[in-house]
Image: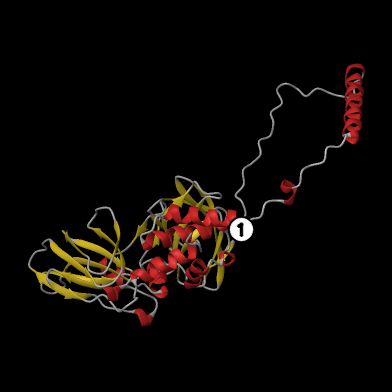
Amino acid sequence: MESVGARLRHTRESHGYTIEQVARDTHIAKRFIDALENEDFSAFPGDPYLIGFMRTYSDYLGLNPQETIQLYHNMQLQEQPPPIEELIAPRHQLPVGRILIVAVAIAAVVGIGYLAVTSDVFVRQPEDATPVAEQPSTPVGRTHRMVEQIVEQRFALGDRIVVPVLDVDYTVTIAAIGQSLTLRYGDAERAIGADQDAVLDLTQDGRADLRVVVRRLETQETPPTAVLRFDRGGVPAAAAVVDDGAVQDSGLPDLGATSIPAREAQARLITQATTAAPFTIQINFVGNTMVRYQLDSAPRVEQYHQSGQSISVTAQRQIKLWVSNAGSTRLQVAGQDVPLGGPGQVTAALIAWVPGQQTGDQLLQIFPVY
């Protein structure tokens, strides 16, 4: 029977994928991909992480995740020897000690019953006494320190994420995982639904410090887990936190703002017209790429595309676009070629009609989103 590691490795090699490419597309660290293929399961911090990475990797390779996980469980059962006690027939001995214990217990019960009837040693509790309910608490999980700008992985209930902001550490705790995810930070709590995102004001200064995206909630696992994306640079510079937790920004040009000079990029003009009109976006893929886009106010779409595939959509006013590998995409907007970036580069952009400052024409521009 083929082992789990050999099955994953042979399938990856048959597709012609490298480990670096798989790590880039699935957001799984290279050391964990190596550990899965070499069956070094001790490299994972816990079984929920191992199962989660195995499910994601199998799905990426086109394998049935449940079959792969079942194969792993079968391997674990085969490697565990039966307890020696089950192989040795138990000896039948006269339980003398057990008989003495039972006799002493009966005598004690009789004595306590006599005292209860003849004395005031035992006092009956009032019938209206209300038992104190035990307060539920969040289990203590692992502590993860966020050293990169973006972290995307599976977290378990009770896990804590330490986020440095201006040389001060702030802790975000996964307090509940159910129909939605509940995060606790300081004296505040925030609930986020599946496939939703939110920004957190960790410093309590009225400005957003951290963007959280809920990819998936796994409530059937023990403990429950969630695939989350934490992004310290995913909030526009003009974003501010208001009372209802929504993000408020001051206009389209601010979406291209960044506090890092090396990352500054200007909006680029694609075309202009006297009036704004619907425009077509065509993307041809020359490599495997994850794409997310949102047309105008429609729901967000997320898809994984392989080399040779393409998509074509039409926007009325704007489209928000995110790609995991800009070098593997060929973008055309309103018939114009628009470069997004180099190989392996994660790119986010807003393509929208905006009024011209001098001519009064409508300008179709692409704005970088940080």
Horizontal side of residue 92 vs 210, given as left or right: right
In the image, 353: left or right of 326? left
Whole-percent x, y for residue 99 in the image? 89, 30
Give the quarter of the figure containing the C terminus. Answer: bottom left
Q: Sort mark 1 into few (<14), some (14-19) or many (20+) by Cα contacts within 10 Å.
A: few
On the image, the x and y values in percent for residue 28 come to: 45, 67
Please, what secondary structure does the residue beneath circle 1 have?
A: helix
Residue drawn at 36 percent across, 67 percent down: 236
- Quadrant hosting residue 287: bottom left
Quick one: which residue is furthest to the top in this view?
117
Please tell me which residue is depicted at 35% across the width and 60% down the height of the picture: 62
- Looking at the picture, tell me which residue is in the foreground, 248 or 135: 135
Q: Nearer the viewer, residue 267 or 216?
A: 216
What amino acid type is highlighted by mark number 1? Glu
Which residue is nearer to you in this view: 203 or 231?
231
Do we see residue 107 in this rendering? yes
The percent position of residue 170, horizontal first and vertical second, equals 55, 64
Q: Is residue 130 left or right of residue 43?
A: right
